Image (cartoon, grey):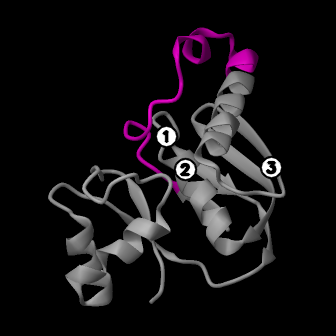
Amino acid sequence: MGLFSFIKEKGAKIFGKKEEEAQVEEKKTLKAQALLDYVKQLGLPYNSIKISVTDDDVKIEGEVASQQDAEKILLAIGNVEGVDQVDNLMAVAEPAPQAQFYTVVSGDTLSKISKQYYGDANKYHTIFEANRPMLDHPDKIYPGQVLRIPEM
């Protein structure tokens, strides 16, 4: 899939004091483990996965069954506070066209985004479902968050 940029000051706060105060090499290992634990906590499926961290950049390698799984893992990791870029090198067993991505801006709602992409505000649930489990409620989006916009 390639290299994706995110807003590193926004997102889920999963890195704690031990990750931030560790020495450089240990910090990379602790952050990679925290990201892997986060992917597992969300229940995102993968066949194999390896996450490595360099400063604020993350590289994901491994294999997933579907394009959707690869994109959800990419967005789960990219939408973590402190992550600037994600290089998604995961192999997809059943390749499919990549979904579009949208970065939320102030004033956005899923209905507004749905109207923009699908011409119908009532199709917001398609975007909500495409971003589960990272989203747990349609009203809980924030500026800077990157969302999957699947084709209809």
At 70% from the left and 33% from the top, the residue drawn is 32
Which disc is residue 76 wearing? Answer: 2
Residue 87's spot in the image, x, y percent? Answer: 67, 54
Q: Is residue 83 left or right of residue 87?
A: left
Which residue shows up at 75% across the image and 38% down it? 52
Helix, strand or loop under label 2: helix
- Is 22 magenta? The answer is yes
Task: Check whether the beta carbons of the residues at disc 3 and disc 1 lie within 8 A of each other.
Answer: no
Q: Amino acid at mark 2?
A: Ala
Residue 101 location in percent, x, y? 45, 69
Q: Quick one: label 3 or label 1, which is nearer the N terminus?
A: 3
Quarter of the view holding residue 107: bottom left
The residue closer to the viewer here, 83 or 76, is 76
In this view, 140 is above or below 56: below
For disc 2, the neighbor class at 10 Å (few under 14, some 14 to 19, many from 20) is many
Quick one: label 1, few (<14), some, or many (20+) residues within 10 Å? many
Pointer 1 residue: 80
Task: Where is residue 109? Give x, y as percent.
Answer: 21, 64
Q: Nearer the viewer, residue 60 or 48?
A: 48
* 52 on left or right of 104: right
> Which mark, by number, is residue 49?
3
Could you tell which of marks 3 and 2 lies nearer the N-terminus?
A: 3
Q: Quadrant of the N terminus?
A: bottom right
Q: Secondary structure at mark 1?
A: loop
The magenta region covers 5-27
Which corner quadrant holds the C terminus?
bottom left
Question: Percent position (x, y) of residue 6?
Answer: 46, 50
Q: Are marks 3 and 2 in contact (CB under 8 Å)?
A: no
